[in-house]
Each structure stands twice: as structure tokens, then as C-alpha cells.
Amino acid sequence: MKFFGEFKGQLIDPKGRLTIPKSLRAELNEPQIFLQTYDTGILWIFTHSKLKRDVEKIDAAKDKHLELENYYRTLHPVSLDSQGRLLIPSLIRESVATGNKVNVIGAGEYIKLDFQSKVDELHFAKGFLDKVDQMEQRRKAVDF
């Protein structure tokens, strides 16, 4: 099972639900899926079969107890509703998944949710204003 594609600026409704794009949803055909906190502003969605493969790899490790504990504490069992929406738990929305827009990225064995932060929007706005300023300076240079 592989997830492909990128869907930028997907909206999260006021109740914390994200509609998973249909092409990605087709691969989430297992009854149990998991949401994993990865880093600030990043979540992963994956299936129970991937969870099993990950746990098998960790079981083969030397210090597996601590590694398993760290792995399991980042997981949150979730499911899709009949309309293909994923409810992001409120605790995660408050700490990791800030904002109401997310880039949904098919990343092979999992789906990456990359939340657009205000910092990203500020960088975009600054870059845009810099380009406008450069164009204005070029126009003035041509106008003598």
C-alpha cells in the first residue's frame, strides 16, 4: 500500500475535521488507522499493517522496551467518518496541529500532514513584498 500526491491548503473545519482526499482515502481501507505526532506542525497517518511492521522492526532492536514506549506514546487511534473526514483530537489540535490549513502529502507508507504555520505565511508575504519592491525598483530605473 502506497500513498501518492500532494494536496496543499486543505481546510480543517471548526470541529477539527479534515477531509482526506479521495485518492488517498482509497488506500486507508483498514478499520483502524493511526495518527502519529512527529514534530511541531507535522502529523503522520498510517494503517494498522504499517504499525505491525514498525513494531516488528523495533522488537528486533536491543533496547526495545524504551523504543516501543516512545513509539506508542506518539500514537492516537483514529478513524474516518462516512464522508472521509478525520477528526483530529483536540489535544493534538492545541499542541501540534495549529491552524486551519494543512498540506496533505502522500509519502509512501504514510500520509504526512504538514500544517501551515503563521511563520510560513509571514515568510511568503515577506517574499512577495520583496518581489514587488524589486519590480518597483526596476521600473524606476527604466523610467529615468
Image (cartoon, grey):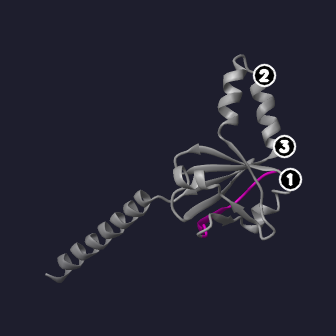
Give the mark, 2 or 3, whose residue is nearer the N terminus. Answer: 3
How crowded pointer 2 is (Cα within 10 Å; few <14, some 14-19, many 20+) is rated as few
Residue assigned mark 3: 49
Residue assigned mark 1: 30
- The reply to whether discs 1 and 3 touch (Cβ–Cβ < 8 Å) is yes
**Quadrant in which the C terminus appears:** bottom left
Between the residue at mark 2 and the residue at mark 3, the CA separation in whole angstroms equals 17 Å
> Which residue ends up furthest to the bottom in the rendered image?
143
- Residue at figure coordinates x 86%, y 57% from the top left: 29
Identify the magenta region.
1-13
Q: Single out the mark in the foreground, 2 or 1.
A: 1
Give the mark, 2 or 1, whose residue is nearer the N terminus. Answer: 1
Q: Is residue 47 above or below residue 14?
A: above
> Is 91 or 2 nearer to us in this picture?
91
Residue assigned mark 2: 60
Q: Is residue 138 above or below residue 106?
A: below
The residue under label 2 is which amino acid type? Ala
Q: Is disc 1 placed on a helix, strand or loop? A: loop
